[in-house]
Image (cartoon, rainbow, N blue to C red):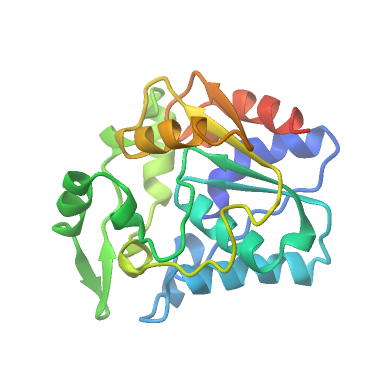
Amino acid sequence: MGGWAWTFVAERLRAAGHRVFAPTFRGLAERAHELSAETGNESCAEDAIACLVENDLHHVVLVGHSFGSLIAALVVDRMPERVVHLVIIDGGIARDGQSIFGRIPREIADKRQKLAQAINGVPVLPFAPVTSLIIDDPDLARWTHRQLTPHPLRCYTEPIRLRHAPGNGVPMTYIACVKPRYPVSAGSHERVQAMPEVRFRPIAAGHNCIISAPDLVVAELLAVP
């Protein structure tokens, strides 16, 4: 996905008077032509940090959904002074030395890795079929599917490097999608509930809630302390 996935959430937040930035990372979505062997978690984090710096953003509520939660974690690890609250939407709590495939259930990681293909010599994971997007509205699911692009495999296999504890002292909220519960995220739900420093907020929506249930997501974001 790219910044386009935040269209419905962003328009509601802007209507409520907020400034919203949804950067697309190199190699993804409309920047798919920038895919290279260097595309990975670090390049995504660089793009997110550049968005903060180039737009002179401070006192930011930083939101990461799914894979984006990993990038948000890298951002607060390097630049916590810009962020007043970190919100993770149905993603993982990143830990130093751990890859995404090292965190999610082994059988799911193995299945996905077998799907890997190559684009101009760069290993990628193909995007999900329309039937697996967990979006009930068929028109909305097809709209979403038309915009998906393959994702660099390196983002899933490469261990990340964090210098600080998860969140780096920034207040955190975790929004858990529980209707239905996404198997990849279920373990994270359990781990987060055992972290008293994280504000846990379940919502009755599927994993791609930023597209399928923007009103629920916006309500939670506007309630962030």
Write the residue at 24% across / 80% down: 121
Compared to residue 70, the image places residue 52 above or below, namely: below
Compared to residue 38, the image places residue 81 above or below, namely: above
Q: How many marks?
A: 0
From the image, which quarter does the C terminus lie in? Answer: top right
Report x, y in % for residue 20: 74, 48
Report x, y in % for residue 78: 65, 69
Horizontal side, residue 130 vs residue 174: left or right: left
Q: Quadrant of residue 145?
A: top left
**Residue 107 visible in this rendered orientation of the protein:** yes
- Who is closer to the viewer here, 26 or 183? 183
- Who is closer to the viewer here, 40 or 195? 195
Horizontal side, residue 220 vs residue 121: left or right: right
Write the residue at 71% across / 54% down: 21
**Residue 207 visible in this rendered orientation of the protein:** no
Write the residue at 30% across / 47% down: 104
Compared to residue 205, the image places residue 95 above or below, namely: below
Q: Quadrant of residue 133?
A: top left
Report x, y in % for residue 1: 45, 52
Report x, y in % for residue 211: 51, 34
Compared to residue 166, the image places residue 205 above or below, namely: above
